[in-house]
Amino acid sequence: MRKLIIGVLALFISNTTAFAGSGAIAYSKPDDVVGVSHGCRSQKHAKRWALLDCRRKGGSDCQIETYESNACAAVAIGNGRRLGRAWWSHPLGEFEEELSQQGALAGCNETGDEDCKLRAWVCH
């Protein structure tokens, strides 16, 4: 029984550590520019770095669209620059990336925009 408990604890700790950190996605609609951050020590830092990345790429009106801590977040954008975003977290870190990406695409399609494409995602 003790070995089972130690094994379960080791699995939990390894999954928690693998997904440690924060990330964010910023978007400047007028310029269609996306900025991303990942592996930051806090949400505040993640947001700041995503905004800086967006501005560095030429974004004139960068806004935080989504952020995550120990999870996955994604943004999809269509031709009309309408945005879909999603955030997903699972206790064992399973399927987060795929589900956040699917959610962002579905959100963009629900806006009625055409040709929605996944533009950015961050996972930790």
Image (cartoon, rainbow, N blue to C red):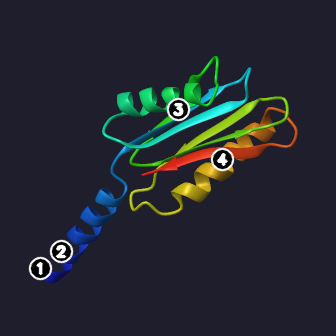
Q: Which residue is mark 2?
A: 5
Q: Secondary structure at mark 4?
A: helix
Q: Is residue 1 visible?
A: no
Residue 47, horizontal then vertical, whole percent: 45, 29
The mark nearer the N terminus, 3 or 1, is: 1
**Which of the two labelled residues, at mark 4 and mark 3, occupies the earlier sequence position?**
3
Callout 1–callout 2 Cβ contact below 8 Å: yes
Q: What residue does disc 1 label?
A: 2
Mark number, residue 103: 4
Q: Could you give the CA–CA distance between mark 3 and mark 1, rounded to whole angstroms?
A: 48 Å
Is 82 drawn above or below residue 123 in the view shown?
A: above
* Disc 4 to disc 3: CB gap under 8 Å: no
**Element under label 1?**
helix
Of callouts 2 and 3, the N-terminal one: 2
Residue placed under numbered mark 3 in the picture: 53
Q: Nearer the viewer, mark 3 or mark 1?
A: 3
Q: Residue at 25%, 63% (x, y): give it.
A: 13
- At label 3, the amino acid type is Asp
Whether tag 2 and tag 3 are in contact, CB under 8 A, the answer is no
